[in-house]
Image: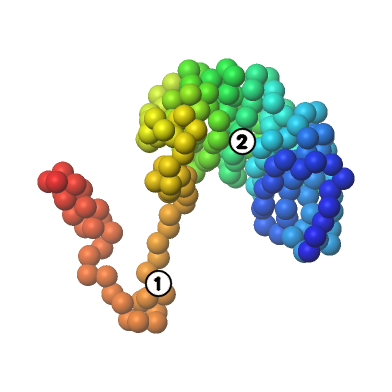
Amino acid sequence: TQFTPNNTVVSLAVFGPDLYWGTIQGDVAKVSLDGTMYFMLGNANGAVFSLAATINGVYATNGNRVSAFKPTGGLWWDSVGDPGVNSVAANDLNVVWTSTNSGRVRRAESNGNNQKLITSSEQGPTSIVLEGGIARWSNSNTGEIRESSVFGLDNAIAIFATPPDARAGRVTVEGIATIRYLTTHHYFDCGKAARELGYKPTVDLTEGIKRTLATISRD
């Protein structure tokens, strides 16, 4: 199904049966994935270059702050102002966002309460993802991917550094694959093999982790 918004779309997010988008003009809207229901949520008062959608709300960046909208429409809350707010990520409990110009990464509860700094000394933080209580973001000036607990303060650590060629704009295939792996959820379930093939693990999870750690230490 094709649905054509009235303004220039620059960001997208999907949650449940709905597609959300943000526009250069600041509009935040949604349409059902089958294209049958369209709904305007509100305006973020600035170009919406990043969106995140959860069961609680829709979170949009406008360059200076994060604006949260209710799923049924209407502004819910605004974050504190920060120059260069670039990217936002969210889950049912927390919202996190980066401010490229100020070097800050912030978090809030999904309802806007307890807005706090995660870190204040990053080097050009841009894209951000959120997995459980861990935020991971890229630093455009250093080529690093860094992470921190959403409850931390200036205790972020680097978990991946891109090669100099990638930092200069020549991104390698290996670098892209590594970034995708580090920012993707990975869950594995042998239930289907057990049901259809009679598979039975010979080593349980706890023992498997012990053996893995022992091998890493030995090598």
Type of residue at label 1? Gly
Label disc, if present, on residue 191 of the rendered structure? 1
Type of residue at label 2? Val
Can I make out residue 196 in this image?
A: yes
What crowding class fits label 1: few (fewer than 14 Cα within 10 Å), some (14-19), or many (20 or more)? few
81 with respect to 118 (left or right): right
Element at label 2: strand
Q: Residue at x 41, y 33 (%)?
A: 165
49 with respect to 172 (left or right): right
Q: Which residue is mark 2?
A: 88
Q: Residue at x 60, y 45 (%)?
A: 92
Q: Position of residue 60 (x, y in %)?
A: 70, 36
Quadrant of the rendered structure where residue 53 is? top right
Quadrant of the rendered structure where residue 179 is? top left
Q: Residue at x 54, y 36 (%)?
A: 128
Q: Position of residue 159 (x, y in %)?
A: 37, 35
Element at label 1: helix
Q: In this rendered view, identify the residue nearer to me: 151 or 120.
A: 120
Q: Which residue, as the protein is rendered here, is positioned at the far left?
A: 218
- Placement of the N terminus among the 4 image quadrants: bottom right
